[in-house]
Image (cartoon, helix red, strand yellow):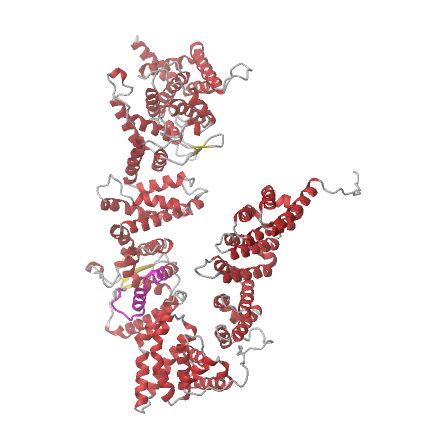
Amino acid sequence: MAAARQVAGGRALETCGMERILEALKLLLSPGGSGSSSLQITKHDVLLATLKSNLSALEDKLLKDPHWKELKLLRDAVANEAEWPRGSADITWAFTAQTLLLLLCLKETMMRLAAGFNPGKPNPRTPEAAPALSPDTLSVSQQKTVQSVLQFVVTLGVCPYLVPGVGVPLKCRTEFGAVVQDVVCLSAAPSAARRLYTSCSVLLSVAQNAALGSLIFCRHFGDIAAGLCQLGFCPTERKALNPEEEVLTEEERALSREALRDILDQVYQPLAVRELLTLQGGAPQSCTDGKTQVRCRAPAWLRRLCGQLLSERLMRPSGVQAVVRGILEGAGAGAAGGSDAEAIAADWKKCDVIAKILSSCPQQSLSPEDYYRDICPQILDLFHFQDKLTARQFQRVATTTFITMSRERPQLAAKYLLQPVLAPLHRCLNTAEIPKSDMVPGTVLVTEEELSRCIEDVFKVYVVGNDPVTVLVDSLLPVLGVLFSLYCFTKQSVSHTRSLCQEILLWILGKLERKKALASLKGFAGLDRSVPSLHSLCHFKAAAQGGIMITIKEAICDEDEDEALYQKVSSEQCQVEHLGDLLSHCQECGLAGDFFILCLKVVDFVAALQRACASLAHQAESSVESQTLSMSMGLVAVMLGGAVQLKSSDFAILKQLVPLLEKVSTTYPDPVIQELAVDLRITISTHGAFTTEAVSVAAQSTLSKEDPEGKREEQQQASHERHCDMSPSHLKPQQSHDMSRQTGLKPNPPLVPPVVREPSITTNQKSGSLTAEQLQEALLSAYDPQIPTRAAALRTLSRWVEQREPKALEVQEKLLKVFLENLEHEDTFVYLSAIQGAALLSDVYPEKILCGLLTQYDAGKDKHTAETRMKVGEVLMRTVRALGDMVSKYREPLIHTFLRGARDPDGAHRASSLSNLGELCQRLDFLLGSVVHEVTACLIAVAKTDPEVQVRRAAIHVIVLLLRGLSQKATEVLKDVLRDLYHLLKHVVRLEPDDVAKLHAQLALEELDEIMRNFLFPPQKLEKKIVVLP
């Protein structure tokens, strides 16, 4: 009898079509009804009635319809081979069992059709003809049917039997899932574990077909993996006394564990990582009713298991990519970047999480060194993706991981991360041993691709990461000489690596200790040969793809020695010039000034002055000594004239020159040198607070390298004019006394009142006629200790900015610095002049200047006082008034800056910020756009909670301005926040202790009342309309 059934089943397999099975599956999924209009029937009853009705309809079709005979025979044959329970008093399991049988039938049929498919050879005459489809191919509608069936099987046969904490509960998925959770009868046979084992086993069997497997794992891999984890690893409560009581045998549990590892190896690895992370534990899920329901925490055994499986995924080839893609794609980035890739790339927290995962050595690894040896090459590969969006994410993750590993295990990071990255630069150091096989002239030591990749990787790690970890800084220090030589080579032609090299050098010079940075600069300038540099046999060469490669130099013949010497000298000269360009970007940190003083020490101007004094003592004036002395004093004048920024420590070094300068001023025969020595001594003694015109002229003469004789005449004339125009009465009495004591002259009594020394420019001066000397004089006068002189200089600079003088606009950054520093002056005349100048400058260059002003306004108490920041606020408001309608372009940064100011610890600054915010809203015609919610939320919070009454008044005043300015437009612009503002005003009227704030709130309520009356009861307008009929 069994043999007959087997033969019939084989015949049915050969004749049953795939369409008939899919039709049967559709019949099981067809929606039904209860047949009653009673409102007492619940969703649970409707679901059970529908499942029972569909099962009965399928059985009737199989028994009565002759066209379904083959399907019935096939189903019976598959059912006889199945060793799992199908009958149950629970209608949900009966429905699931029948669906699983039909899926097995579909799988067998598809495999039989695929095995019998033998496509003919393609016709070469018609190559455009599409190849024949395999008969087991599912159409789009058929795929949708199978997906719906799989969703029912997983929802009814897998999810209800997962223990709490394993997977996402049905109640937190969909409304239908919540209904299913309540209708499943767990007390009926078979047991929950047996049902779960059956469902997972059958689904894995169906997934052996490639087409069905992709549909199963694409949507339901997480639920199947959760079921297998529970079946294979969940600890049992007690050991069964006999085999009949055992729910699952040990063999079945072992098969579940093996199946879990198999599917984890088969599926797309980022998908496996994402689902394992979900199983390990995630954020609370939102239910269908809109309320957030806290999920049960994953059991300890599941967390340990998922951690072990994730570590195994990580240790596989390309495991780092799988982990990174799994986490980022799980956040919505998509496989190739996706629409949310920009947001993911900006999410540093997620990158930090990935970095912590990758930098932690798993327990499966033998040692941290073995782990780093396997993982670090994969981390470096993350830097080199071609797709732009994916590359941006991976590079950020790689940078964060690189820095994290360097911080946690610096020795291993240096060996397995930094050495491979910096290897191309180490290869061509003068301290490296080049193999004899590579010593052949013309040999490419570092290819174009290697060097470009090295520079780009260093830029991403150091400059983009911007974390000066000790091991990172120390590793880059030996190759700085090669980097600087490469930078100098790129300055000679067009190269995409020039900006990268410049940024790397500026970053490392700013992060190094000052002593090490100066030592590196000495090596760049050729003053210290002990600093590692480019190998003498290596040189840079332009490559075919626009990059640079490093090759071995050609041998130099005896005839070419002169040419080689000339090339070496010119190369060193170019390097010094490029070093000057590089140092021009280091003005703010003071490194350029320190290096200049270091160069002064190297040249030893003190010794030059000592030799000049010795020659004076012996009454022997040599032309060489005279020129040396003139050049030395000229360079000191350049330094004091503003070419570099000097600090107190620098002046402490320069004070060594004061005794020598005093001796020169009293004994040297040349009156010009005497005068300059006196002026230099005064400038050094006052730390630059007082600088004469002679110093500026000497600095200009040294820099311009003009005719010494002609310039000496100019210097004598300028000195004579200064001597005639300026008397000691121009200085304060104390300064005059000090100056007379130092120069040996008697002070003249102040017979005339002090004369304000203004820059030499007339009011009606034509635009474009401003000279560099006049500009330099005005800049120096802006720091004059006399208040009238300083204010006049600031007014003059402001006038030049207003007249758009080209010379003045070329130094806009220096002008802004002058104005901002004078804001801190306590005198009203000075800081008001500075406010006017900064506002005019912002009107000329709003793009550049406004950002700097906003940064100054945002600075905390540790950088600027509250008074200074409020002065900057006045500059901002003057700029807003000057911009007019163009202020809408800068609406967002201005509003956000004032909102941050409303949270400042200083009460006066908070009130000032709110006042500025109110005026800004007026200038914007109250068109706040999307930030209206932020503004109103800030005003409400301040008006309710700020402890200072002035701040609360300011907040309520801004609300009054909003309502008055918008008038009838308030119902449109403030429609989402109007109710909150009304509640706030009522709160202030009832509970505010300050009478002024109450009055403002009452006025605002009256304004709001008028607005709402006009909105609800608009005035009637009688109009006559003339309509022309067609």
Number of marks in picture = 0
- Horizontal placement of 514 versus 719: left or right? left
Percent of width and height locating residue 736: 46, 82
Horizontal and vertical percent for residue 659?
A: 34, 82
If the image is split into quadrants, where does the N terminus sit? top left
Examine the rendered structure and indicate whether residue 41 appears above or below residue 707: above
Residue 741 sits in quarter: bottom left
Outermost residue toward the left in this view: 436
User: Is residue 592 depicted above or below 930 in this figure?
Assistant: below
Can you say whether 725 is above or below 463 in the image? below
Looking at the image, residue 421 sits to the left or right of residue 730; the answer is left
Q: Label the magenta part by its dominant secondary structure.
A: helix
Q: Residue at x 37, y 49 (%)?
A: 395
Q: Where residue 842 sits in the image (x, y, percent)?
A: 54, 63
* Residue 219 painted magenta: no
> In the displayed structure, does residue 924 sit left or right of residue 147?
right
Pick whichever, 402 or 931, lies toward us: 931
Q: Does residue 354 appear in the picture of this structure?
A: yes
Give the image location of residue 848, x and y in percent.
50, 61
Is 506 covered by the magenta stretch?
yes
Residues rendered magenta in the picture: 504-532
In the displayed image of the protein, which residue is found farthest to the top?
1
Q: Quadrant of the C terminus?
A: top right
- Observer-nearest residue: 230 or 87? 230
Q: Which residue lies most toward the bottom here?
A: 619
